[in-house]
Each structure stands twice: as C-alpha cells, then as structure tokens.
Image: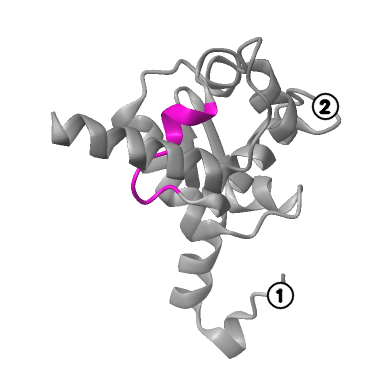
Amino acid sequence: MDYSDVVLGGYAVRRLRARTASTLIEIGRDRFTRSDLAHVDCFNFFAAARLSDVVNRELQVKDTRDLFENIPPAALALRGVGTICYAVLGALFELKRLGSPSPLQKWCEHHLEKDEHLVTIQTLKEAARKTQRKRKER
C-alpha cells in the first residue's frame, strides 16, 4: 500500500504502518496481524478482534491447533460471536493449515458425535440459546 509521507503526513503514515503490523487477533500463543488475514482474503477485522476477545476471555487454549482439536463449535456459540466470527476462525485454521481443504467444515465434523449431523452456525446458536433458557427456567 502506498503510504505517502508527503500526502498523508509522517504521523499518519507511522500510525497506519504500526496498525498494519500490530497483532489483531490472539489465540493462545498464536498471533495474527491484518496482513496475515489478508493472505487468506479475510478482511473482517472487527469480527477478528471480537473473536480474539471472546476466545481469550472464555476459553483456555494453548494455540489455534488446540482450539481446532479440543474446542467444539458449540463452545463458541456465545453472545456477540456471530457467523462472521466463525468465518474468521476458518481463516485462521486455513493460515495454520488445519483441516484442509475446508478447515471450518472439518473442525465442525471433528467434533460431531456419532448420531449428530452437521448444522449451520445459526442453528447451533439457536440450540445454545434454547439450552440457556431452559437452565434459567429451572
């Protein structure tokens, strides 16, 4: 990207370069920048930051591989984690070469029980909400 000091000013250019190079998302010890995500055509930076916040607050994972192998998709069916956050997670799996050729689908299939079938994230989130309502009613 053309960061012209003459046009944008030195301060703005330094800030833009720092932001581009800074960590946007953390999954345990793994760190990803905007540039990393751009390599897999992921430009949902707000959702990436949200995912990072939720994963680090709610889940105890060592890294992206640990999340892929040990955390089922239902564990992320939390308030504020939408379909786009799951798409970003799929991009992270792709960056780490986990579950190729369709990492998000492979992750979901990896965590299915014998009698379960694959459902959309929206269906998963609706089921989680119903379960939460039932717990509150008790």
Q: Quarter of the image holding residue 119?
A: top right
Q: Is residue 40 magenta?
A: no
Residue displayed at 53% across by 58% down: 45
| Residue beneath disc 2 | 100
- The amino acid type of the residue labelled 2 equals Ser
Residue at x 74%, y 34% (from the top left corner): 94
Residue 48 x %, y %: 51, 49
Q: Residue 47, relative to residue 111: is it above or below?
A: below
Q: Position of residue 16 (x, y in %)?
A: 52, 67
Q: Is 41 placed above or below 51 here?
A: below
Would residue 125 appear left or right of 7 to someone viewing this image?
Answer: left
Residue 126 pos. (x, y %): 44, 45
Report the number of discs: 2
Residue drawn at (60%, 17%), measured in percent from left and top?
Answer: 111
Quadrant where the N terminus is found in the figure: bottom right
Residue 75: within the magenta? yes
Q: Position of residue 4 (x, y in %)?
A: 64, 80
Question: Dot 2, crowdedness within 10 Å: few (<14), some or many (≥20)?
Answer: few
Quarter of the image with the C terminus in it: top left
Query: Would you call the spot at circle 1 few (<14 residues within 10 Å), some (14-19), or many (20 or more)?
Result: few
Which residue is tagged 1?
Answer: 2
Q: Which residues are magenta?
A: 73-81
User: In the rendered image, which quarter is residue 5 located in?
Assistant: bottom right
